[in-house]
Image: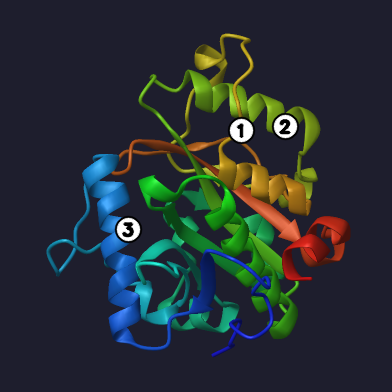
Amino acid sequence: MLDVRSTVQPAASRYHVSLAVDDSEIREAQRLRHKVFAEEMGARLSSPLPGHDIDLYDPFCDHLLVRDLASGEVVGTYRILPPEAARRVGSYYSEQEFDLTRLNFLRPRMAELGRSCVHPAHRSGAVIARLWMGLADYMTRSGYEYIVGCASVGMADGGHIAASVYRQLTERHPAPVEWHVTPRTRLPVESLDDGQSAALPPLIKGYIRLGAMVCGEPAWDPDFNTADLLMLLPMAQLNRSYARRLIG
């Protein structure tokens, strides 16, 4: 397991980023995920432990945590599924939503991100920045060449914002067609896009600032009631100036 704690902390910060080192820290992340996904967003979660978001991928993942130094509380989390762990579990999580056939040749070098969330009282942007600090350091140390992950857009408005976000991303940040994936439950963006502009969610902004691309149409996740976009970031195309600001 990689240790990000000694290399990415700013000199003065309210928050601290690290990898979970034991089951108790993973449980903290899972409780935060339940709070955000189930209690706040109304996601239908199937978990063996009440008050926690736990699935079969968790034991195979590394878990990034951001703590509020004042309270000691975990206020942000992200999980990372390395390629060798994806082989052991049998798939990437995103394969539940997308056919990744065109990305097969990237698998040995591709780490997957997922379950990103931030406590509602800490959504100033600083926590997301700390998560990306930890992620950039993790990828640099591990030598993986590609980051892939689902970025979610809420569907509370029926999907109009999600369709607008997808249109903006395909206009400005499309992946090459050979990296396109196919959603298993396609969102009908052509009937939902009203032509209006919508602000990009913070997580998607983070992807784009680092140089990521969108790999095709969004999938609808009925359990979370979100439109999920598959984002791909080749580390060779990483926005170095932005990354330097993250990892120093």
For the N terminus, the quadrant is: bottom right
* Amino acid type of the residue tagged 2 in the rendering: Thr
Residue placed at 61% from the left, 33% from the top?
A: 200
- Residue 198 vertical placement versus 27 (above, below): above
Is there a contact, CB below 8 Å, between mark 1 and mark 2?
no
- Residue 173 vertical placement versus 27 (above, below): above
Q: Which disc number belongs to residue 36?
A: none
Determine the CA span between mark 1 and mark 3. 21 Å
- The crowd level at tag 3 (other Cα within 10 Å; few <14, some 14-19, many 20+) is many
* Amino acid type of the residue tagged 1 in the rendering: Leu
Is there a contact, CB below 8 Å, between mark 1 and mark 3?
no
Which residue bears the numbered disc 3? 33
SS of the residue at dot 3? helix
Residue placed at 45% from the left, 83% from the top?
A: 88
Considering only order in the chain, which callout, 2 or 3, is on the residue closer to the N terminus? 3
Out of 113 and 222, give the one closest to the viewer. Answer: 113
Which residue bears the numbered disc 2? 170
For residue 103, say whether it is visible: yes
Is there a contact, CB below 8 Å, between mark 3 and mark 2?
no
Considering only order in the chain, which callout, 2 or 1, is on the residue closer to the N terminus? 2
Residue placed at 55% from the left, 23% from the top?
A: 163
Which residue bears the numbered disc 1? 200
Residue placed farthest to the left in the image? 50
Out of 17 and 226, give the one closest to the viewer. Answer: 17
Out of 70 and 210, give the one closest to the viewer. Answer: 70
